[in-house]
Amino acid sequence: MAHVSELPCDGDGVCMVCKNKAAEGETLTCKTCVTPWHVACLKAPPKTLTDAAQWDCPDCSDPSGAVVKPAVSGGGLVEKIRAIESDASLTDREKAKRRQELMSGGANEEKEKKAGSVRGVLGILGDKFNCSICMQLLDRPVSTPCGHNFCLKCFQKWIAQQRKRTCAICRKTIPIKMAREPRINSAIVMAIRMAKHSQSNFAGGAPRVHHFIHNQDRPDKAFTTERAQKSGKAKCMQWEDFCNGSS
């Protein structure tokens, strides 16, 4: 790790050692972590331009052999970046692209998790409820007379681009009224909603039980059950018990 006296520049370009903003030609970027460093505050700056192009910062080079941070926090990020940099088959642009993908791994995981939930719903419904344009799960579905389904935004965008108002799949003519005022297919909306609900119940285990007592089955006097969260009397059929203040 870097010594206490060797620190990089912050996000504003101010050196964390001398507290001065480094000029454009006075900074050196690490080829591994792409962090700017103030050359004047380095103990061992590179001597030639070739060394500067292949320069590793004190945090990445670790010359002192000090204890490295646990791999749990970074997940071996430095090792992966070094492997990308040492790959001679990649160009500089490809290396930069792979470094960017590696640094944004958390955002990609969120996208994959969201896509996985959508794929689960698609597995229940099948391909019939996919939009014929964007090929994703239907969002505010619109059904044409020829039997094809589209998202409302995809349908409106397609109609705006076409002069003859034809279907995007079979090229059959779409009625003028539907092209101007498309209606959402409520049956498909309910089917998608029920599929999502059934999937959430399946993922969460057994469905939650909701207890309900009809009015004719309730007792005449107020009472409190063992599951009650509050101490007040309730669940009686005769409302005059509340008015009279009976216990």
Image (tube, rainbow, N blue to C red):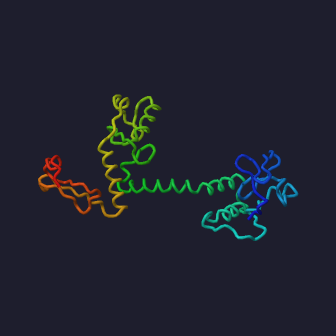
Is 20 in front, or is 134? 20
Taking depth in this image into account, of 177 and 31 the one nearest to the observer is 31
Return the x and y of residue 154 as percentages of the image width and height.
Answer: 44, 39
What residue is shown at x 72% (from left), y 46% (from top)? 12
State the count of labels: 0
Quarter of the figure with the N terminus? bottom right
User: Residue 159 occupies which quadrant of the picture?
Assistant: top left
Question: Who is closer to the viewer here, 98 or 36?
Answer: 36
Task: Classify residue 143 by image quadrant.
Answer: top left
Residue 47 location in percent, x, y? 88, 58
Q: Is residue 219 left or right of residue 141?
A: left
- Compared across the picture, whether 230 is left or right of 244 comes to right
Residue at 82%, 46% (x, y): give it. Answer: 25
Query: x%, y% of residue 15?
Result: 77, 51
* Rendered residue at 33%/35% (across/down): 183
Image quarter (top left, top right, bottom left or bottom right) of the C terminus: bottom left
- Look at 69% across and 56% down and name the residue there: 95
